[in-house]
Image: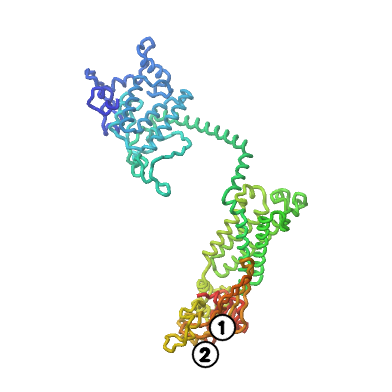
Amino acid sequence: MATLANSAETPLHLMFWPECDMERACKPYQVPQPEKNKGDGKYRASELAKLENKEPPAAAQLTTMDADIVANLLAGASLDSFLITSGKNMSSALLGIYDTLQSAVENALAATLPSRVAFNQASADAGASNDARNRANDRMQKTRDRLAERARPVNVKLHARGVEQLRSMMPNTFGPAYFMRRGAVTQNYYLFGLEDLPTRESVPVTYYGEFLDNKGKLLGSTDRTRLPEAGVVSSEHLVLAIPRNHSTAQLVRNMNQQLKAAQLSNAASDAANARVVQTGSALTDAVDQHRTRNNAPTFRILNSRPFSIAVLMLEMWNVNAEFQGREAASREKNKNRVRLGVLAAGIDLIIAMESLTIKLVGTQSALALARKPIYDLADSNVKRWIGKALTERLTQKITARLITQSFSGIIFAGISLYDAWYAWQWNDNAMYGYLLMAGGAAAGVVAGMATGAASAGPVLGLTPLGWLALLLIGTGASLVLWLSSTPLEDWLLNGPFASEGEDNAKHLKDPQEAFYRLIGLLSGIGISVKQNTLYDPNAKLDIHSENPFEVRSANTLIRIESRLPGLIGSIGSIGIQAECRMREVVTTNFRGSPISTQKNVSGSPPVYKAQRIYMDALELYVDTPKMIITPKKSTGFEWAVRAQFVLKNQSETRYFPAPGVKDPTRFSAAYAKADFNKTNRPFWADEQTNKA
């Protein structure tokens, strides 16, 4: 049959199929004039069309099985459609002709459009039977799957021939249907196989033997329909359409809607059954979820001892940072802010120590008492004051750890709000980050005290509010790092060029002081302590040597440099006051591991072996003793350097490095001498803060 369908010269082809071309298939069917039987055996559509609305013959007149099947089919429907989805034997004469055409087309090009037409035509009887409806639904879905997988362009020579055959046999039912370009379709046309189709849950499909890149994107396949460039342009391919107000379109649409309604009903029933099964196994799922969470790598890491030790080390560093920066913070902000910062860091350190102790020794530790309830809201009179509803939403068992965590969170929120207000005073966009951190701290306090929906479903030990608090704090800290103004931006936004009426930085309103702070920002003071590249351990007196003996015999070079001579050298004279002290570092060891470190600064200044003066730098050549190592301790030596650049002219004297832009400190006798026990002091550069 495939050979007959593709060969237009064979006699059987002329008998089974009408003539058809591109022009005829893309316009409504024109009923031809009645044809006379010339005895040549050619296909005559007018003779078949006479049977479309004809009453079936009496049963006594039926002489063949095919005639009996066709009569029963016609008697079981409304005669509005030729193909009826009753799921019965499809071996009748007319249906056999069309199925033969469809088989030929499938063998020739494996196209799917006739299958869609066949399905929509076969859907004319919506209420024939439940079995027929299910079979139609399955057949429709298979057709859609083949369309999605193949998406091949319509071959009019093959496909249009079958449509033309159908239109010629049933002109009243399918005569107005014809092929048209997808881009030309409007709302006035109904598309067979593309509208009012029931949907099914998509099933993942795995393709084997294809080439994929490292991200899983398709590179090559033996199936051309799987390649992006092998697809059909959506606006150019042909579709089978019929006017939307035609009776056939209305019939097919009503049937599809009934199928969709039945499918939705079945889906709702399946969902209800699934909920019943899920509810019945809720306890098992909860146990499995708990076991899975405990075995997850992330949870094991967060619940491990090394992680608790890392948190403890981080808190110790935080306490040290707050303690070291307390002097600068008290100058720029106020002492109360410094005290709260040190207090909050200390409380966080205590909480981290308690957590690590529980990990190491369990509940035998004395700190484990912090987790025992000290107050029960259920047995107290708190309900009288805050109400029963609110009491039930709070944690019933109050512990010392919970109180400490809440107190720490409240302090952190207060510190963040103060920092946001301080940033707002200085026109610093970092205030948004501080506000987010304050919100995160407040959410953390509520997460520890609340129960119910706010604390339901903990993930990795944190409730939804806990994760919200962590997200807000992390996002806020990132915004602070990103949006914080640089010192130069602070000077521009709050200095002599700032808007009138702003008095948050009164020391910058003075032009002389503002210029002094600007030069301090650009001074570029740097101190480096490194090995002398000219050092010779076997140096000898040699009058012909390019470098003096004192330079070659010194193993350490201290260099102090600045851009001040080039910036303000014409304003006045610039001098460098440099002071150095030997710092002894003693490390005590226990079984080969260091347990403590002590630093002692020498009280007497060293003797410089040589010095070299440049226009913008000063080099000092000194000797550093070698490190002394014993089994119990090791003693090393390093240099503590303090340097001050002094600008003098007829009207004033200025000292560099200048204080920060936000620091209103003025030079006084308290800063006249170098302090080797402190770093980051105004008017004095040191080897740590100003490391080159």
Q: Quadrant of residue 250?
A: top left
In the rendering, at what x and y percent does residue 326 appear? 63, 72
Above or below 5: residue 358? below
Residues packed near mark 2 inside 10 Å, few (<14), some (14 to 19) or many (20 plus) = few
**Residue carrying label 2:** 650
Q: Nearer the viewer, mark 2 or mark 1?
A: 1
50 or 559: nearer the viewer: 559
Q: Is residue 134 visible?
A: yes
Q: CA distance from mark 2 to mark 1?
A: 26 Å
- Image location (x, y in percent) of residue 53: 36, 20
Label 2 element class: loop
**Of 317 and 543, the residue lying toward us:** 543
Which kind of residue does numbered mark 2 sit on?
Gln
Secondary element type, mark 1: strand
The amino acid at mark 1 is: Glu
Residue, disc 1: 579
**Whether residue 6 is situated above or below residue 451 in the rendered picture:** above
Q: Identify whether 234 is placed above or below 340.
A: above
Among numbered discs 2 and 1, the one appearing first in the sequence: 1
Q: Residue at x 32, y 35 (%)?
A: 154
Looking at the figure, which quarter contains the N terminus? Answer: top left
Q: Residues within 10 Å of mark 1 (few under 14, many from 20)?
A: some
